Image (cartoon, coloured by chain):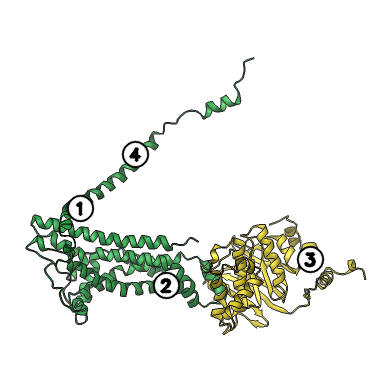
Chain colours: A yellow, B green
Amino acid sequence: METATLTPIVQRGLRARERGGPFVPGEGRTVIEMADLSVYYGDFRAVRDISLKVEEHLITAFIGPSGCGKTTVLRCLNRMNDLIEIARVEGRVSYHGVDLYGKGIDPVEVRRRIGMVFQKPNPFPKSIYDNVSFGPKIAGIEGDMDEIVELSLRKAALWDEVKDRLKESGMSLSGGQQQRLCIARCIAVQPDVILMDEPCSALDPIATARIEDLMQELKNDYSIVIVTHNMQQAARVSDMTAFFTAEVAESGDRRTGVLVEYDTTEKIFTNPSEEGTENYVTGRFG
Amino acid sequence: MAISPSTQDVVLARLKGRRVDLKGVLFEALLLLALLLSLSILITLMADVLRGGLGVLTERGFGFLTAGLATFSADTAGVKQGIVGSMLTLVFVVLLAFPLGIGAAVYLEEYAPDTTFTRFINVNIRNLAGVPSIVYGLLGLALFVEVFRPLTGGTTAISGGLTLAVLVLPIVVITAAEALRAVPDSIREAGFGVGATRWEVVRSHVLPSAAPGILTGTVLSISRALGETAPLLLVGAITGYIATGGQSLVEQMRSSFTTLPTVVYSYARLPSQDFREVTSAAIIVLLAVILLVNAIAIVLRNRYERKW
């Protein structure tokens, strides 16, 4: 059969198989599912009615203009929004079918399984070793700590650069190294999902490329959700893309984020169903 | 046709010339005057004290520090009880005001929900730090000397120390809260992000990061407590002779006391010219102690201060 006649999603799947990657959008298991998710800050509804499924071993990108609620949605997925007192969530976020906002769910346990990498690299002002070992230590993870630290740093592609200076402060590293240290710190807790909130926005292009390469390796072991302002980045790294936008709320001048379209990255960037998506990805808006 | 001036000449003509900025010069002069005036007052004060007291100190040296209070002969007058009393009262500041103040600050900054009530408390703590110290003296008199007399023994070092502890408590809370607030939220998020509980985040990351700032604040509050006179006079820091020989620490705590600033006060009230010099010498000792404590605070801050 001519490849060209296949739908993009199948083409993509074939290419993935050729690469040896077993993960195909639409075929994997759902890790996180949002259903009619709305987030309020006080009386203000920041995002409304978000429904989408995050699949296992894929990189799912959230794109959209500033203020469209991408980060807000991301922070709901591991209950980081709990730290904001006035934040309130409506709808359902389930992780392997379990309602994350259900009764008796411990946000600390949630965050051990759904880790997070932040916009600005934020290593603890401690040694590189302590940065990585803190998570496993408090989680009570069994095993040789030196080994866990080494493995995590290797997975984060940082080991060779820091193996001789594990006792030095994490703050002494360059921005890109700090962000990889944060990734190592995150995977040291052996999470299932990694949430990345614009992980490269504070980095130069070379450091960005390293993180993007790293993400491709990490997706073999983890499911990744990344918020990015950079559309090229979303197109380069992600398998699935969700496009958010902000609509003027019913009352006043504040804006509420909505999900416009969610599909394979290829579809979103080459043949989006919604005009709004097309305008955004072609640079006519936003 | 006239030769038009070159561009360079035109630009030069426009850029040349010094502006006479009279107002600016005048303003600068005024500022300098303000600085010199305040400095000169300070220097005069210091010079006066040094002129009066340095003689006594150089003459008697260490002996002045170990000699007790005396009201009849200036030659034997010293500040021993003042030093001992100041140290005794500071014990209470360190043991009470520090843990209570730091604890309250950690609660307010890290645990308390941001409600109208907590904001009300915050504002009130700031107001408490501005309450004149004599008011704390009255509180100490009513509470520690009268109500708790069975425990404190009345006008004793315990009462004095407790009064000072209450006095610096708001200062400790405010400085500790500021140090905690200076810890960026990204550190807390990082901790929560790897699945730490609030306790683990506070203990492992927030407190160590804020420790230098908290330490500086507490050391500064020590120097504040060291300099207080008025509230201690109210709770009975006596101005006469007290014995300091051969007592146990508990006995000293439960007996009459005096502190360095009250020693200065009691010497200053004596009419003889000789005692003026003794007063100045005592002031020098007090200033030296306070400067030393402040210097410790500055060194600590510079050594451990962290930039984010």
- Bin the neighbour count of mark 3 within 10 Å (Cα to Cα): few under 14, some 14-19, many 20 and up: some
Do tags 4 and 3 sit on the same chain?
Answer: no
Q: CA distance from mark 4 to mark 3?
A: 70 Å
Q: Residue furthest front?
A: A164
Q: Residue furthest right?
A: A1
Amino acid of disc 1: Leu
In this rendered view, identify the residue nearer to me: B122 or B24. B24
Point out residue A95 in the picture as x, y percentages from the top left corner.
66, 80
Residue pointed to by mark 2? B106
Residue pointed to by mark 3? A266
The answer to whether residue A194 is left or right of residue B21 is right
Amino acid of disc 4: Ala
| Above or below: residue B239 compared with residue A31 | above
Amino acid of disc 3: Glu
Point out residue A94 in the picture as x, y percentages from the top left corner.
66, 80
- The mark found on residue B50 in the picture is 1
Q: CA distance from mark 2 to mark 1?
A: 43 Å
The answer to whether residue B193 is left or right of residue B117 is right
Q: Mark 2 or 4 closer to N-term?
A: 4
- Bin the neighbour count of mark 2 within 10 Å (Cα to Cα): few under 14, some 14-19, many 20 and up: many
Q: For numbered disc 3, what is the local secondary structure?
A: helix
Q: CA distance from mark 1 to mark 4?
A: 31 Å
